[in-house]
Every structure is written in structure tokens, then in C-alpha cells.
């Protein structure tokens, strides 16, 4: 609502007495959220190792190399270096906003040597009035000047409040980057181990198929098998071996991605990773808490909420432009024509003044600035609400993926054993001449598909565990995390009021 000059004058007197800041006071929005996740109960039915500490969840995989790689990523990752630089920038802006509330002072000094020309109007006048006057003289001056804009209406305090919230948002964003780096490192490492397992399965299956081809070749040489059978099994071997280059290419790409995440040149850790290790099993997840706990723990949600607080404070800074700006300036110094007399009583000089600046005829522009600030606050509120919903969705999706992929792995394991027995039986039957080679080839293809699918499912379950830890906000705690949590979120999540009552318009302070 537009503010008239008369209303602004009336508010001036009241605000000078009270010293309050104009603009809406920030209140954290409340949101609808259940007390538990929909698929949380399914986690208790998992057969997994004990749950690790959430702050170091990667240690729950019980893989020393994985733990070491995550530690290196958290030390050397370049995304984290950029996040640290953004914190430095935000803190510097907060320092500038704080300094704007304080008086500013400057010290200046200068020494001048003057020789007056006789060919200028001033020189001719002086020469006519006082011929042979002293044309040269010196002047020395030293001054301390100070100025202070009084923050009667809190515009600069609101700006400092916004800057402080931005610092907290930037710190929380850096924590989110840290969590993402740890999760990406673990995910890429597990992908590498999964690809290595699939490569080993493919090569093992190709070796078994070559043994079958040797058998068929011996039968062909003895005149028992037809050339068609030999070519069929040869084709099967080549098809299986053709899978190896694609898997090796994917493995190379994953190793390069891991090196980049570690802040190293691609290829740095390839030799270390070539030592094939077992794919670590997914650890347990216990006491994950519900959505209310997620709001206090997940750093990207803290960052979104702090940016909402900053946007709210910016409204007050914009509203403060309705009111006059009062400033005080002063100067104390000394000036003399002789250096030795600089600090004598006669050389002392001083000046004091008060000023007022008021955008009295610029209210339309101010109203537009306030409207823009309110729009940014509404955008930040919607972004925060969306981030909360997406975070809950991340948890639900990752839990579902973890539980279902483990179920799939168990079923595929049982199916693999049955297909292995069927394949061995078909090979023996073929050797005795009771079944055709087609049945052996069919059994071999099914066994390869089952073994590969099981390796994929096991990799998916381990990676789903990583996604679950990331979605739950684990692994970012630092010495300042408790302060961030206190600044970012409270414990209650009652029904939302759509932000209308939480962030109501308040132009009077």
C-alpha cells in the first residue's frame, strides 16, 4: 500500500523514539508433513550390517579404500574449494553491511607550495594593490573527517540481517556440496566395483563357453557333430566376448570421473582401482527420523530457509527508503603556512554539520522496489516449500530402491543357482548325445543374463544405500553444523498457513 508523506512524517517521530526497524519480522514458515516416511517400516525388515554413524556413513560399507577415497575427496574436491570461496565472499559482504551501521572516518594531510603568477587576473589585482607582494608561500594541513548516517528506521539493520542470513545459507549450501561430494565419490566407487564384477562374470562365462566350443570341436573332428553346431557355439562365444569392450569403456569412464571428483588428473588412481575388490554390501539404516528431523538435518533445506529469511529482511530494507536519511558529518584539523605551527592553537580548524536526504518525490520508484522485494520473498518461500517436498521424495525413492533392489538380488541369486544346475545338466546331456546343442546354448545365455542381472541388482542396492544416506542429510556435520541447524529450522511442522500470516506485510515496523 502506498505510504503518504504525512504518514511517513508521523512515523518518523515514533520510530526515532522507539528505534525499531521497519518491515516484517521473520517467522519460519510451518509446513504440513507426516511424522514418519511411508516406507520407513520396510527398513527394519532388511538383513544388513549394523547402521553406521550418519556423519560418517561411508564407513558402514566396511571398505578401507572407499573410506580413504571419500576422505581425499572431502579434502581436495574443487567443488568444495569453490563453496569455501563463496563462504568467504558472503562473510565479507556481512562485514560490509555491519560496517555501514558505524561511523566512517578518514585522515588526510597535504602540503602545498604556491608561487603566484602576475599574468592572471588575481595576480594583476594583487600586484596593483600591493606591488612587490610575496608571490610564494607554503600551506600545511592535516584533518580528521567523520560521517555517520543514523539508522533511525532500521534499513541498514535489515540489510545486515539479510547479509547474515545469506552467510548462513552459503554455509549450509557448502555443507550440501560436501554431502554431495561424499555421496558422488561413494556412488562412483561402487559403480566401478559393480562394473568390475560384471566384467569378471562376462569373462568367466566366455571361458566356459570356449570350453564348450572345444568340446563341440572335438565332436566335429570325430564326425559326431555337424559344422552348424560348431559355428553356433562359436557365435555365442563371440557375442559374449563382444560385451567386454563396452564394459571396459564404462569402467574407464567411471575411473576418470572418480579421479576428477578427487581433484586429480584422470588416470591417477587407475592402477590402484585395477586391483579388483568385492562389491561391498549396503549397510543398515536405523533411526532415520521422519520429515521433521529431515528439515533440521538436511543442509540444502537449511540453505533454502535461510535464503527465505534473507529475502524477508530485504523487504524491510526496501521499505526504509520511504523515510528520510539523517547524517552527521564533522571535521577536526589544523592548517598553517608554516610546518612548525601545524598543531598550535591558532592553526586549529573544525566543522560540524547535519544533513537530511529524503526521496520525497520518488515514492513510485520505492513502491516498485518494495513490490520486487516481496516478489523475491514469495519466490523464496515457494522454493523452500518445493525443496522440502523434493527432499521427502528423495528419501522415499531411495528407500524404495534400496529395499526393492535387495529383494531382486535375492530372487536373482536363487534363479542363478537353478540356471547353473540346468546349464551343467544340459552340457552333460549334450556330451552323452541326449539333447541338442541348442538347449545348451539357451541355458548358457540364460545363465549369463541371470548372473549379470544379479550383479546389476547388487550394485543398485549399494548405490541406493548411498542415495538414502544423501537424501537423509548425513555426512555433512562440521563444528558449525549445530549453529546452522539452530538458525535454520525448528522442530514443529504444523499445518501451513500459506505464508500469509507468517510473512505479513508490515510497513510500520
Image (cartoon, grey):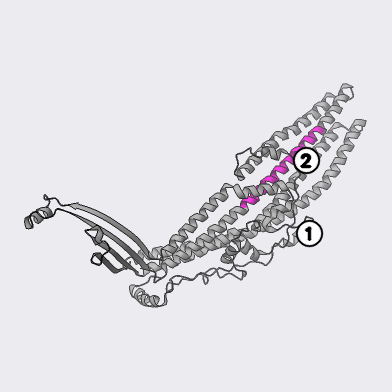
- Mark yes or no: residue 314 visible: no
State how far apart marks 2 and 1 are (Cα). Answer: 28 Å
Q: Earlier in the sequence, mark 2 or mark 1?
A: 1
Q: Which numbered tag is attached to residue 45? A: 1
The verdict on residue 241 being magenta is no
Query: In this view of the protein, which residue sits in the foreground, 340 or 335?
Result: 340
**291 lies left or right of 457:** left
Query: In this view of the protein, which residue sits in the foreground, 38 or 245?
Result: 245
Question: Residue at (64%, 39%) from the top-left corner?
Answer: 268
Q: Which residues are magenta?
A: 180-207
Marks 2,1: beta carbons within 8 A: no
* Res 209 → quadrant: top right
* Quarter of the image that includes the C terminus: bottom left
Q: Residues within 10 Å of mark 1 (few under 14, many from 20)?
A: few
Mark 2 or mark 1, which is nearer to you? 1
Query: In this view of the protein, which residue sits in the foreground, 348 or 225?
Result: 348
Q: Which numbered tag is attached to residue 449? A: 2
SS for callout 2: helix
- Mark yes or no: residue 64 visible: yes
SS for callout 1: loop
Q: Is residue 88 above or below residue 315?
A: above
Q: Residues within 10 Å of mark 2 (few under 14, many from 20)?
A: some
Q: Position of residue 266 (x, y in %)?
A: 61, 38
The main secondary structure of the magenta stretch is helix
The verdict on residue 192 being magenta is yes
Amino acid at each position: 500500500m502506498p505510504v503518504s508523506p504525512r504518514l511517513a512524517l508521523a512515523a518518523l517521530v515514533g520510530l526515532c523514539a522507539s528505534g525499531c526497524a521497519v518491515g516484517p519480522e521473520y517467522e519460519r514458515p510451518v509446513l504440513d508433513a507426516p511424522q514418519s516416511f511411508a516406507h520407513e517400516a520396510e527398513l527394519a525388515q532388511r538383513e544388513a550390517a549394523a547402521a553406521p554413524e550418519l556423519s560418517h556413513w561411508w564407513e558402514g560399507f566396511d571398505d578401507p579404500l572407499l573410506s580413504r577415497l571419500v576422505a581425499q575427496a572431502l579434502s581436495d574436491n574443487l567443488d568444495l574449494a569453490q563453496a569455501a570461496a563463496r563462504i568467504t565472499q558472503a562473510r565479507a559482504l556481512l562485514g560490509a553491511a555491519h560496517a555501514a551501521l558505524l561511523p566512517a572516518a578518514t585522515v588526510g594531510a597535504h602540503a602545498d607550495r604556491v608561487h603566484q603568477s602576475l599574468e592572471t587576473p588575481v595576480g594583476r589585482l594583487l600586484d596593483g594593490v600591493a606591488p612587490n607582494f610575496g608571490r610564494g608561500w607554503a600551506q600545511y594541513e592535516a584533518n580528521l573527517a567523520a560521517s555517520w548516517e543514523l539508522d533511525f528506521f532500521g534499513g541498514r539493520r535489515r540489510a545486515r540481517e539479510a547479509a547474515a542470513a545469506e552467510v548462513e545459507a552459503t554455509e549450509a549450501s557448502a555443507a550440501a556440496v560436501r554431502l554431495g561430494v561424499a555421496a558422488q565419490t561413494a556412488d562412483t566407487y561402487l559403480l566401478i566395483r559393480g562394473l568390475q564384477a560384471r566384467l569378471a562374470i562376462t569373462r568367466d562365462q566366455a571361458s566356459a563357453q570356449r570350453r564348450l566350443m572345444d568340446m563341440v570341436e572335438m565332436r566335429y573332428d570325430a564326425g559326431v557333430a555337424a559344422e552348424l553346431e560348431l559355428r553356433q557355439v562359436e557365435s555365442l562365444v563371440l557375442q559374449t566376448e563382444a560385451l567386454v569392450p563396452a564394459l571396459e569403456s564404462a569402467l574407464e569412464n567411471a575411473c576418470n570421473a572418480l579421479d576428477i571428483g578427487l581433484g586429480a588428473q584422470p588416470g591417477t588412481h587407475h592402477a590402484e582401482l585395477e586391483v579388483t575388490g568385492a562389491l561391498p554390501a549396503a549397510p543398515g539404516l536405523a533411526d532415520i527420523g521422519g520429515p521433521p528431523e529431515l528439515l533440521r538435518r538436511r543442509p540444502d533445506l537449511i540453505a533454502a530457509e535461510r535464503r527465505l529469511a534473507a529475502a524477508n529482511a530485504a523487504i524491510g530494507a526496501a521499505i526504509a527508503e520511504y523515510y528520510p536519511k539523517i547524517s552527521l558529518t564533522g571535521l577536526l584539523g589544523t592548517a598553517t603556512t608554516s610546518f612548525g605551527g601545524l598543531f598550535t592553537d591558532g592553526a586549529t580548524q573544525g566543522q560540524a554539520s547535519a544533513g537530511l536526504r529524503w526521496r520525497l518525490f520518488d515514492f513510485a520508484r520505492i513502491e516498485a522496489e518494495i513490490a520486487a522485494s516481496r516478489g523475491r520473498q514469495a519466490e523464496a518461500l515457494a522454493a523452500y516449500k518445493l525443496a522440502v517436498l523434493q527432499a521427502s521424495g528423495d528419501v522415499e525413492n531411495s528407500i524404495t530402491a534400496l529395499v526393492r533392489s535387495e529383494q531382486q538380488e535375492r530372487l536373482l541369486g536363487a534363479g542363478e543357482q537353478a540356471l547353473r544346475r540346468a546349464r551343467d545338466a544340459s552340457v552333460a546331456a549334450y556330451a552323452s548325445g541326449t539333447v541338442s546343442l541348442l538347449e545348451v546354448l539357451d541355458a548358457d545365455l540364460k545363465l549369463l543374463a541371470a548372473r549379470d542381472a544379479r550383479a546389476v541388482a547388487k550394485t543398485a542396492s549399494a548405490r541406493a544405500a548411498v542415495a538414502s544416506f544423501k537424501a537423509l542429510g548425513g555426512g555433512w556435520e562440521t563444528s558449525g553444523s549445530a549453529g546452522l541447524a539452530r538458525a535454520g529450522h525448528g522442530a514443529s511442522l504444523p499445518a501451513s498457513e500459506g505464508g500469509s500470516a507468517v510473512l505479513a506485510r508490515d510497513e510500520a515496523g
